[in-house]
Image: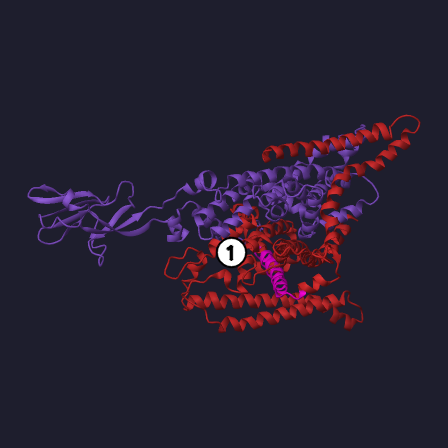
Chain colours: A red, B purple
Amino acid sequence: MNPAFQGLITIIIGVGGCIAYFYLSNQFLDKVLYPAKGPKAGQNINKANMIRPWLFLFPAMFALGLYLAYPVFETLRLSLTDRDQGGAFVGLANYNQMFGEPKFWEALRNNLLWLIVVPAASTAFGLLAAQLTDRIKWGSVAKSLIFMPMAISFVGAGVIFKLVYETRPADQNQIGILNAVWLNFDGGIGSFLMLQLLPTIILLCFAGIVAYVGWIFVRPIAESRQNGGGAGFVPLRLFVGAGALYLVYLSISSLIGVFTFDYPYGEPQTWLTIPFWNSFLLMVVLIWIQTGFAMVILSAALRGIPEETIEAAIVDGANPFQVFFKIKVPQIMGTIVVVWTTITITVLKVFDIVFAMTNGQWETQVLANYMFDKLFRANDWGVGSAAAIVIMIMVSPILIWNVHNARKEMK
Amino acid sequence: MDNIAGSKSSLGWAVNISVVLLVALWVFPTFGLLVSSFRTADQISGSGWWAALFPSEQTERYRVADPDDNRIERDGLFVVEGNLFEEGTAVGEIQSWGTSSRDVSAYQAGETADLGDGETFTVDSDGNYVWSGNDEQISGRGQRAFVTAISPPEFTVRNYDNILFSGGPGDNMAKAFFNTLTVTIPATIIPIVVAAFAAYALAWMDFPGRALLIAAVVGLLVVPLQLALIPLLKLHVDIGIGKGYLGAWLAHTGFGLPLAIYLLRNYMVGLPRDIIENAKVDGATDFQIFTKIILPLSFPALASFAIFQFLWTWNDLLVAKVFLIDATGQTTVMTDQIVNLLGTRGGNWEILATAAFVSIAVPLCVFFAMQKYLVRGLLAGSVK
């Protein structure tokens, strides 16, 4: 049968079936099971109204349970079994095997890098774009152009950026724009500005922000010492503080690298094969896609800020930067967190970009692609499931946080 | 911010320039691919796509027609006349030319070169030449001419013809295009129907456990797809669906439901309570309220979700690879075919760029046509 025809039939059966189910089950409830007439009419109506919500909910709950809830537990179970031994329970052997593979640690390390860089950069660019486009006449056009990559598939974006990173031998014209730009650097003043001064500023800004965030988390502990009061989540706060300290150390130490590194000027680079840095080039693709999302949400939040607070600040003599960082950003902090967590989830699931562009070669592996590799190339369902569980564990703090917020909002 | 005096004028130009730069940075990569898809393979590998937008200067070597066959005698001199370019291969308007490889632009177009002893050679801007001299000079091999021509930007739609209609089985995307469409449409419509009923129940019906169910939906919103792959593939194989369209439709429906329920419920909760209560007083059943009142009023939310689900299913690779594409490869979708092309046709940018653009074009059209609903959905869908 022609698949298009099959699709048409499926739509008719699916939609018609759903509507028929809802209609008939409601009719059955009202006319046959608990008819709203006779001696028990009132009682019957009440009973019918207690059952009706579940009639409405049943198909959705069934699908959700089968396609999302059940697999979580089944994957957990599979991660403790071995397919080759007929699904026998093997305890944590799969996890042991996975932890012994360097590829897994490479994937985990890259994933953590992605987790730091992509949400931070997307949110920062999104905030910048939102703030700037709100102030100009052709802002809505600019917004929809920056937003456009949202509609492009990860695979399509992969192709787009592969062209950007394309390399040709040194004696031919470069057709990738990155190499074309790169060949213009020759070690002169322009190169100094772009390749040493700019990274220095970025690294220092990054270190500053991380240190500030770390301090926000750790400060309550120090304060509670003085006041004698307790600060909640002490281990979490210390953990975040330690992480921030490590990141500051990393960025300061890479500053030295920026100045001592011997740039290979004049030679076209095969960008995607340079270990460590190629991960960043893949991240650029996702940042490019997600910035539009961050911009749209943050721009709505910025417009929701009460005008009076800004006017008051300007009357008090605040300059535009102070207005932005001290008045606006604190007021949309909640939205920034939402954007950040949403992008974080996208990052954890990122698969297509790596699969299409490098397939995990040259040390660009990420967890989702590692898992796919295990599943469909190595055919090892146990280790694949274990990798999926690791992804789930990384998502779960956000899951709990979201559920917590949603419940708070409903009350 | 526009109404606050002072804040606009002082930084206005800086803001405008920054936005221009930002937009350029964001549009450039896609634009490059679009331009490349209209160039021939030789053009793409010869120069960067940005060069294609400007007239290009090319220097090529030509030789005039064989004098022994083509010369004619005129006024005591032998003359060879003709055009340097073969029929239909003109590279553009000739700017300058020369007769030696050491000085390829010794003469302007239309000038006559004196080659000594009365031998002359003239080339005009269209490539017409006149070579004249005595019997001995106009013989042997034809005169060489090095021509520098400015050719206007040149584009072709042959790549699209190749990808969509005439290409070989590996390159032709027509089948994959229809496969993608076949996956996408049912996978967009069915979750809407299922979710709309559930969202109504969660928004407007009172029953024990409602808050818990909403919390569960919010939780399921972020469950990674990766967890569902193995168990569901096993399930599909066990119950006989195997790999195919039905499995892909079901999977997309399941994975799209949390967002659909969440979006629609948030929207429906905001509808005015009066309408619903009035209808109830007038004796409408829940089923009637839902189909006659709620559903029409929820159109913006339905449209938002439909766009999300459409973009997501159209752009999806993972679900298609796991649940749809079997060993025969008959059900390949566009994203998968592009990944395959990246492997087999890594350097053939005319094919890659065109294939990618064919798959990008439809979502882009949907995006620009329905951006309003997409933005609305994003604002409602991000967990607050």
In the drawing, does residue B330 fall left or right of residue B238?
left
Q: Quadrant of residue B298?
A: top right
Which one is in front, B377 or A307? Answer: B377
In the drawing, does residue A363 fall left or right of residue B346?
right
Magenta stretch encompasses residue A230: no
Outermost residue on the top side: it is A38
Magenta stretch encompasses residue A105: yes
Q: Which residue is mark 1?
A: B11
The secondary structure type at the circle numbered 1 is: loop
Residue A72 in the image: above or below residue A196: above
Q: Residue at the location (46% across, 61% down)?
A: A270
Magenta residue span? A99-125
In the drawing, does residue B119 fall left or right of residue A128?
left
Outermost residue on the right side: it is A39
Name the amino acid, label 1: Leu
Outermost residue on the left side: it is B76
In the drawing, does residue A19 fall left or right of residue A146?
right
Q: Position of residue A315 (x, y in %)?
A: 61, 57
